Image (spheres, rainbow, N blue to C red):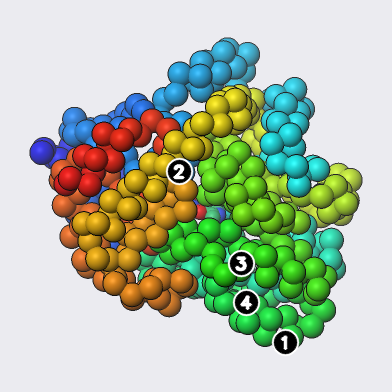
Amino acid sequence: MTISKSKLLFERAKKVIPGGVNSPVRAFGAVGGWPHFIKRAKGARIYDVDGNEYIDYVGSWGPMILGHSHPRVLEAISKTMVDGLSFGAATELEVQMAELILELVPSIEMVRMVNSGTEAVMSAIRVARGYTKREKIIKFAGCYHGHADSMLVRAGSGAMTNGIPNSGGVTAGAAKDTLIARYNDIDSVKLLFEQNKGNVAAVIVEPVAANMGVVPPEDNFLGKLRKLCDEEGALLIFDEVITGFRLAIGGAQQYFGINADLVTYGKIIGGGMPVGAYGGRREIMECVAPVGDVYQAGTLSGNPLAMSAGIVTLKELAENPGIFENVNRLGHKLSEGLKKITNNTVKAVGSLVCMFMTKEEVTDYDSAMKSDTRQFGKCFNYLLNNGIYIAPSQFEAMFISNAHTDKDIDETLEK
Ligand code: KE4
């Protein structure tokens, strides 16, 4: 396997981009070596600049549930682009996207498009505070909700991977209204509510924690959060940037049968283009400017090109419910196969899979942190050198797409 072009590109990149990457976890810092620069992708496979081919279990961190370069998505983009890329003005495509999301997710009565999951989360938090007139937000250690200041407190994903769960540059003032609970521990949430009586605007949760590895909710954790928020007059925010339109067409709300007050989206709803969204009940969303006084804006929000890619992605999923059965079945096949060949802890929910380098149970940040990240690095590089591309971090998920086949899973397990 030749990787000389990637190494040269990485040396060039480090001179002009911090760490040579536009998102930290891509730098392979946690696994050693250097990032393999990707040239193209098709279906479940990616190809680096040295011509190496990999079965791709990152899928751009979730968006590529249909597989890379899906013909219907490419066709939609090519048809839209000839009429212009972005106008900064209202377009029919934005209305179509909003109507489609409302059709697919009954709990949502209004939705606003933004350009990333981070924007969706920071906007939803602002709306929750504006609607409730309260200040505090409860999040969970190890959950990652993008890089807005107030969310970089005990954050997961790259923050956890790079050992900076509490980021530099985030002031005490920015973080003081963020309260940290333990995932799967409802008592830790109750305590925070008691200590901040009447001042918790919202609880934000990944319905399936997928940024500390994959950690499923247990013992009706989400149902208990729903009940507690109702009792305390706080909003429940499901951060479905990963789970949205992945676990089911209605996302985690459908999969677990629990409705949140606000939901954030990203990844899949852009079909690979930069798109985020947040939505919820009309009475809450009408707090958002220009109707209400909660300001949020964006130059490229709802731009036609991204909308066209997102719309056909959601339509493809809605018109082919067998996609969810297939990706969830393949996720089960992979996780059960991993359990047979290793006595490490393996967790999976639908098409999200993670093998932890620990034999102990993993239910939250502290137990996930017991994973042997050096061992993970060895596993990562062995797989990479054998044509399997997983996230360069123990604290991420393996994402399965509809382009993956049983043969891909068998090939992966045989490595
Ligand atoms: P973006 O701003 O990266 O589009 O979305 C932030 C975000 C919000 N909420 C959840 C649950 C997320 O998982 C994310 C982003 N996910 C990571 C991967 N775990 C993005 C990859 C990266 O940061 O490079």
Q: Amino acid at mark 4?
A: Ile
Q: Residue sitting at 61 percent across and 39 percent down? A: 249
Q: Which mark is residue 186?
A: 4
For marks 4 and 2 on the same chain, the one whose residue lies earlier in the sequence: 4
Which residue is label 1 attached to?
195
Q: Nearer the viewer, mark 3 or mark 4?
A: 3
Identify which residue, 383 or 60, lies in the foreground. 383
Q: Amino acid at mark 3?
A: Asn
* Residue extending furthest toward the left: 1
- Cα separation, mark 1 vs mark 4, equals 14 Å
For marks 3 and 4 on the same chain, the one whose residue lies earlier in the sequence: 4
Identify which residue, 219 or 48, lies in the foreground. 219
Task: Count residues near mark 2 (Cα–Cα under 10 Å), then give few for <14, some for 14-19, many for 20+.
Answer: many
- Cα separation, mark 1 vs mark 2, equals 40 Å
Q: Residue sitting at 70 percent across and 31 percent down? A: 100
Q: Residue sitting at 75 percent across and 22 percent down? A: 92
For marks 1 and 4 on the same chain, the one whose residue lies earlier in the sequence: 4
Label 3 sits on a secondary structure element that is loop
Left or right, 107 with respect to 65, comes to right
Q: Which mark is residue 328?
A: 2
For marks 3 and 1 on the same chain, the one whose residue lies earlier in the sequence: 1
Q: Amino acid at mark 2?
A: Asn
Label 1 sits on a secondary structure element that is helix
Q: Amino acid at mark 1?
A: Gln
Task: Count residues near mark 1 (Cα–Cα under 10 Å), then give few for <14, some for 14-19, many for 20+.
Answer: few
Identify which residue, 80 or 139, lies in the foreground. 139
